[in-house]
Image (cartoon, rainbow, N blue to C red):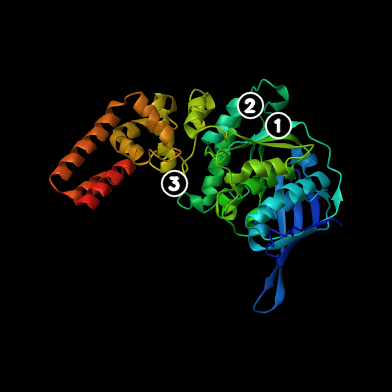
Amino acid sequence: MPTHTIQDADHMSKAAPNKFVINSLVLKKGKTKSRVVCDIDKVTFNKRKRENVVENHKIFFEAPAEYTKYLVHERCDAFVVLVLRYSLSHGYNIESAVPMSEDLYFNITERLLPNLVKNGGYDILINVETAPPLPPGTAVGTGISCGVDCFNTIVRFLDHPIESYRLTHLCINNVGAFNSVYRRVGKQVAHDESYRRAEMAAKEIGLPLIETDSNVTDLYVESHLYSHNYSSAFAVLCMKKLWRCYLYSSSGEDFVSNFTLKNYLSHDSSRYELLLYSCFSTSSLTLITEGDYMSRFEKIERISDYPPATKYLYSCVLKDKNCGRCSKCLRNLLALDALGKLDRFDGDYDIAAYRNRRERNLRYLIKKKETEFFKPTYEAMVRKKDKDLLMIENGVKRRYERLCAAGSYAEAVELVAPYATSDLWAARRVALS
């Protein structure tokens, strides 16, 4: 039975005191839905009592009945990936009575873990039997949350010039995304509305939609921000017999130019998704992170003329419809404003309300102009010499100079506080006074 551990002269890492034990995987067929159920023990060492505490869980992944034959119960690959980050963060070895695909085992133990352990993870053991990989699938899929990133992927790959990379299926998976972020809306409301929206968009796009469900959050509590790449890969690996290629829509932040694993356990897993998906890919399945080279503004520009996006684009975390006021709604609306494409999205957003608050929205843009998501939008507004933006900026600067000349430094600082660069000027003036 192969066992992986990492010990070298340069890095003596923390040994893992706990373990996950995958006891079995069972395929349960139903008339409308089928699921693969994992019997898994979470064994945690209680330091105070000096004994192990065993929690048994039945974790399932469910798909429509027509996809039953693609559900993987012969390999533990998906569930190893599911618990991998938590194991590295909290010190859990991984054991399984179900074999693991030898190519994925090699990639994780020889390529991924040495780097993750070196940069802060527990030195975990993966104690499994290995077996040859399952036959490859033929489908190409991506998720459809109806956000900017996923529509960008759909536009790019729906009619890709290389036929073997053209999309054949869309997916919406419930593997942890419907969490406390949607506390104002309600998790169930957010879930139901997301699935309804995905169904309408997929119908218009003309691709089959695979709606899945899971109770992965019953196994442990962890920030979805830190683990979403792992849980998304879990969903793909649960149906590995279907997929030949799966496209994961990157967030639009540039984590490539200054790639680092330093303190990776305390950051968004998107920071190192290129490494993760390279290592989770195998000879029979390619996982691709798409759009990591593009800014969010560039993505919005690409999708701004795509009819399904103009109807179903959704990024709000405050309501089950786009509120037009939260930061995620505003970054979309401001980008569309800079592109001159607002009216195309009337109905998906309340464009009249946005225009009524345009001055306030532009002030927000100026405040955020040095941040990665807003900088390209601000620069586009400047290039087009947006009169409202220039009036706001010039007015602030003139008032700032008058206040400084009058010796009203505290008032000057308060005036320019929302504007990062001006704030530095004000601080310097105060310091020299």
Amino acid type at mark 1:
Val
Q: Does the rendering let one see residue 233?
A: yes
Please provide percent x and percent y for residue 128: 82, 56
Instruction: Name the residue at 24% across, 33% down.
Output: 394
Q: Residue 195 or 317: which is nearer the viewer?
A: 317
Q: Quadrant of residue 198?
A: top right
Given contact means CB atoms under 8 Å apart, are the residues at marks 3 and 1 in contact? no
Q: Does 385 sit above or below residue 116? A: above
C-alpha distance separating marks 2 and 3: 30 Å
Q: Quadrant of residue 22?
A: bottom right
In the image, taking residue 110 as reference, residue 391 lies left or right, namely: left
Q: Does the rendering let one see residue 215?
A: no
In the image, taking residue 39 as reference, residue 250 lies left or right, namely: left
Amino acid type at mark 2:
Phe
Instruction: Name the residue at 44% across, 41% down.
Output: 328
In the image, taking residue 98 as reference, residue 407 lies left or right, namely: left
Please provide percent x and percent y for residue 23: 80, 60
Mark 1: few/some/many CA within 10 Å (<14, 14-19, 20+):
many
Given contact means CB atoms under 8 Å apart, are the residues at marks 2 and 1 in contact? yes
Q: Residue 127 or 175: which is nearer the viewer?
A: 127
Query: Which residue is identified by label 2?
Result: 157
Query: Which residue is identified by label 1?
Result: 140
C-alpha distance separating marks 2 and 1: 9 Å
Closer to viewer: mark 3 or mark 1: 1
Residue at the top extreme, as displayed: 161
Query: Which residue is identified by label 3?
Result: 318
C-alpha distance separating marks 3 and 1: 32 Å
